[in-house]
Structures are given as structure tokens and as C-alpha cells.
Image: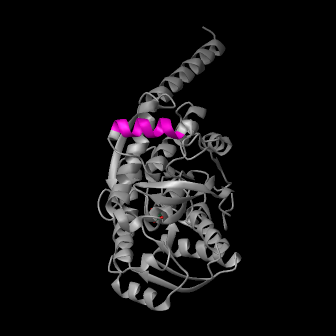
Amino acid sequence: MSTRIARTTLTALALACIATLGHAQQGKLKVGLMLPFSGTYAALGVAIENGFKLRIEEQGGKLGGREIEFVKVDDESDPAKATDNVNKLIKRDNVDVIIGTVHSGVAMAMAKAAKESGTVLIVPNAGADAVTGPMCAQNIFRSSFSNWQPAYAMGEVAGKDGKKKAMTITWKYAAGDESVAGFKEGFEKAGGKVEKQLTVPFPNVEFQALLTEIAAAKPDVVYAFFAGGGAVKFVKDYAAAGLNKTIPLVGPGFLTDGTLEAQGAAAQGMQTTLHYADGLNTPRDTAFRTAYAKSFKLQPDVYAVQGYDAAQMLAVGLSAVKGDISKKAEFASAIEKAKIDSPRGAFTMNKAHNPVQDIYLRKVEGNENKVVNIAVKNLADPARGCKL
Ligand code: PHB
């Protein structure tokens, strides 16, 4: 055999080996689910996991041709433990992709770690403006919303409704602060004024002193950001104090999503804004709701939709790279160009990888957040500070 032929044969052999190795390396796709499975946001974490897994089942248990293996971490919605928790997934478990989380403070620590390590991160709830603002990155995506989006829409709605004086109340952390800022921006643009901003530490639910303050100040409207267990308690306390009879309580839809059975009469008639609603009655949403109810014996809520769409986004990226998630640029570009066929209505991504989506005005009727109309069509987060 001449040297030349030998060299060619060797090169071919080497290439074949690399190709086989590539295949072997593909194996199962390791998905790290970092969500709250305890504490005030526990139900939200479960709904996200359910939605995510439902979409994977619908795809035959595979994404981009790869079977999925899950590693789960309960982040307890605790920012102090967030860096350690996310590093367990990245460094110990060597996951290919991280899905998480609900709490904005935890999500910011996750985004920092994902940006440093290059691990793909899809945020299925936490609205932290920074994640798709100054912290934006090629490998970071969000299937949910920015805190600014539903808040800004509610401000506009309340202002156009003729409300002049507002008070706000929230947990004191990034999501609450940003939600109030978004509301203030929309409300003041529409001619209103936010006169006082009240806060309680996360995840406290001692509201009495602040409710007394609201009763004394008599604003035209109260805007509140709470979610999960805290939202149940706040809406019930507001009604128990008799305030719902005289001062409308509004908020982003988290205040009444996944919580209505527990809130009962206290929530009736409340108006909120969100990127999802009951009664959309589109074939896409009906199919999703029927499948979700069948699998989990529960009605889906916004969190379930966000989990479901995180799996849809991951599927788009992975099928573009045929399961090879190391092809970061192609993976990102496929999601950037996609129209995600969400139960909420189809959405696209802004440059920072946050959904551009309709924000619905909803009204509580029985156990439903019934759609009233579209408050703001195709609302894109401004992605302030994102350099991509
Ligand atoms: C957040 O921390 O960003 C957050 C938590 C719960 C929600 C919405 C936003 O329902």
C-alpha cells in the first residue's frame, strides 16, 4: 500500500470513528429541571413540569431524535441557594439544558451561571427583566414573559378606564419591584398617578397593617403582584377587609391564575392582564387543555402553558441541530426564526429571546379567568440593556 493510500484510508477511518463517537455521545439528552417544589410557589413548579412533560410525551418521548433523561432540583424559591443549586446541575450532573425557574431572584443567578458555562437555559416563568435585558445571551431563552409585559398592559387598562390615583402592593424582590414599575409606566402614560408603593418581604403573608393603610388612603385602584400561595392569602384578606367592595384590586394575572378554587368568592369579578386566559376557544388551546386534563386530572393554568412552550422551543432548536445541542448558533437561530404554536396564541421572540405576545384582559367568573379582550396586541419587551 502506498503511503498516500494508507494516509487516505487512515483519515477515512478516523472520520468514521468521530462520526460514530458523535452518535454515541448523543445518547440521552440530560434535562435539568430546577423549579420550586416546596414553598409558596410549589404548585407553579409542578404545573411547569407537567406542561413540559406533556409536550415531550406528545413528541413520542423524544426531542430532536434524542430520548430525555431528567434531573430535578427543588430550588425552594431561595436566591441564597440558587448558585449552588444550578452548579449541581451544570458541574455535577453535566446537564445539556436547564429548564427553570419561577422566582426572579433565583433565575438571575441561573442566568449568570448559564452565561458563564454556555449551558442552554430556558426560563419557563421568572419574569426578571434583566434575564432578557442586560444579562441576555445566545444560550438564554424565555417561554413566559418579562415582568414588565403584563404589568405595563394593566397600567394602560386602568389609566384608560379613568382611574387617577393608584396604590401598589407587592413582595419586595425583583419581580414585585419590576411589576410595579411596569404598571406605573403604563398607568402614568395614560394619565394616572401611583401615589404610594407598599411592600412586604418575600414570602411573608402578614397583610393586615398594609390593608389598613389602603383603607385609609382610599385610592381609585390597587395594583398587586403576588402569586401562588401568597396570592390566595392576599386576595382573601383584601375581600375579608371589605376593600373589594369599594376599591378595585387589579394585577398581573398571577394574582388569580391557578388559585381560583382556593380564592372562591373573594376573587369574583377581578380584572387582571396576562398572556393567557380561559375561554380562548381556539383549536390549539382546546387540544392542549383536553390533553392536559386527561394526563393530570387538572385544568391547566398559565404555568402549565409556559412549561409546555419551553418544551416546544427546545424541540425547535434541537431538531434544527439534529439533537446536537453543542451547535449553539444554529440552535439559537432556529428558535429566533420560529413561530411557536402556543396554546396562548402563536408567538415569536424579540432579539433578547423573550416572547412577543398578546396580553389579554381577563375577568374572574367562577373558577375561570375569562378572556375579555386583547389589552395590548403583540407586546414586545423593550429588552433594555440587551446587547445581542
Ligand atoms: C417571578 O419571581 O418572576 C415570578 C414569580 C411568580 C409569578 C410570576 C413571576 O407568578
- Residue under the point 49% across and 70% down: 175
Residue 23 relative to residue 373: left or right: left
* Magenta-colored segment: predominant secondary structure: helix
- Residue 94 appears in the picture as rendered: no
- Residue under the point 51% across and 44% down: 309
- Residue 274 appears in the picture as rendered: yes
x and y, in percent, of residue 111 in the image: 51, 60
In this rendering, the answer to whether 5 lies above or below 95 is above
Residue 172 relative to residue 325: left or right: left
Query: In the picture, residue 334 is in which quadrant?
Result: top right
Q: Residue furthest front?
A: 245
Residue 138 relative to residue 69: left or right: right
The quadrant of the rendering that contains the N terminus is: top right
The quadrant of the rendering that contains the C terminus is: bottom right
x and y, in percent, of residue 228 in the image: 37, 63
x and y, in percent, of residue 270 in the image: 48, 66
Q: Nearer the viewer, residue 284 or 219?
A: 219
Q: Residue furthest bottom?
A: 216
Residue stretch in magenta: 285-295
Residue 292 in magenta?
Answer: yes
Q: Nearer the viewer, residue 252 or 134?
A: 252
Residue 23 in magenta?
Answer: no
Q: Residue furthest top?
A: 1
In this rendering, the answer to whether 282 lies above or below 67 is below
x and y, in percent, of residue 118 in the image: 53, 51
Q: Nearer the viewer, residue 180 or 208?
A: 208
Query: In the picture, residue 366 is in which quadrant?
Result: bottom left
- Residue under the point 59% across and 18% down: 12
